[in-house]
Image: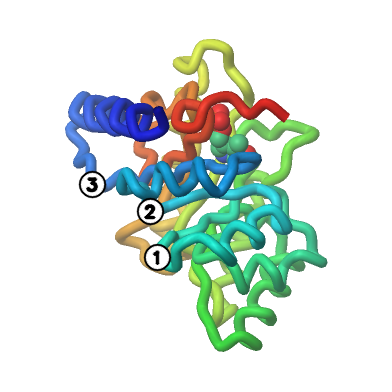
Amino acid sequence: MIAENLAHLRSRIRKAAQRCNRKYQDITLIAVSKKKSDEDILQAYTAGQLAFGENYLQEAAAKINILPDDICWHFIGHLQRNKAKLAVSHFAVIETVDRLQLASLLNTHAAALKKTIKILIQVNIGEEQQKSGVSPAETATLLTQIKKMPHLQATGLMIIPPYCPDPDDARLFFIKARQLSRQLADKGLFYDNNKVDLSMGMSHDFEVAIEEGATIIRVGTALFGARTY
Ligand SMILES: *Cc1c(COP(=O)(O)O)cnc(C)c1O
């Protein structure tokens, strides 16, 4: 079932990429496996899926410790200060950095572990009151400060647009994110300004996100089915 879902998902990604003259290989699918079992993850892995996303540190650490070593784990949940160390030790990419204090703590822990980690800046693109993420206006300042942290590589932006029942209504937020990432790259604020990641698009809107430039899409439900608890 999961293998079939994955094949279907890949074909939808390929078609969306074709529609906008982009390369399928330039889009990384993150299989969002929060609340899903090791068995489910292994089914996707066996079908060739190597990148997974998790939201909850403790749950993720338990999985990461026993699942295959060549899986690339992305942290996509809200990150608390007291979990920063666990995040640095277990994840290849932390997608939800949205404040200076947190970045600084991640840098310190990465230095202690003698490693460099990739991060994305989570931007509150819809400027919603209750949502995590730095405001678009403050993103340049945050990136300027992160540039000085030798153990962090800020490779792009991550966004979760306001929920739109019709995914086409999310398009303007994806466009906004792309434009913001361009401006920031023009200022030279990312780790590699010629290759900036845009993590956007989930099960119900990833095709629109791809059309607007997503390089990373985070898909759970369409791959693993609904989360039941
Ligand atoms: C859960 C989650 C996803 C995946 O959502 P689906 O709708 O199940 O595809 C993607 N991104 C983030 C940040 C999430 O928390």
Determine which quarter of the picture holds residue 175.
top left
Q: Nearer the viewer, residue 92 or 149?
A: 92
Residue type highlighted by circle 3: Gln
Q: CA distance from mark 3 to mark 1?
A: 19 Å
Sequence order check, earlier mark of 3 and 1: 3
- Left or right: where 41 falls relative to 21: right
**Position in image of residue 125 (x %, y %):** 60, 37
The reply to whether dot 1 and dot 2 touch (C-beta < 8 Å) is yes
- Residue 25 is labelled as 3
Residue 94 position in % (x across, y down): 57, 60
Q: Earlier in the sequence, mark 1 or mark 2?
A: 2
Q: Position of residue 53 (x, y in %)?
A: 53, 49
Alpha carbons under labels 1 and 2: distance apart: 7 Å
| Residue ID at (50%, 41%) | 40
Residue at mark 3 to residue at mark 2: CA–CA distance: 14 Å
First-in-chain label (3 vs 2): 3
Q: Is residue 32 left or right of residue 69?
A: right
Who is closer to the viewer here, 87 or 229?
229
- Side (left or right) of 80 relative to 170: right
Q: Which mark is residue 50?
A: 2
Q: Is residue 27 left or right of residue 52?
A: left
Q: Residue furthest front?
A: 39
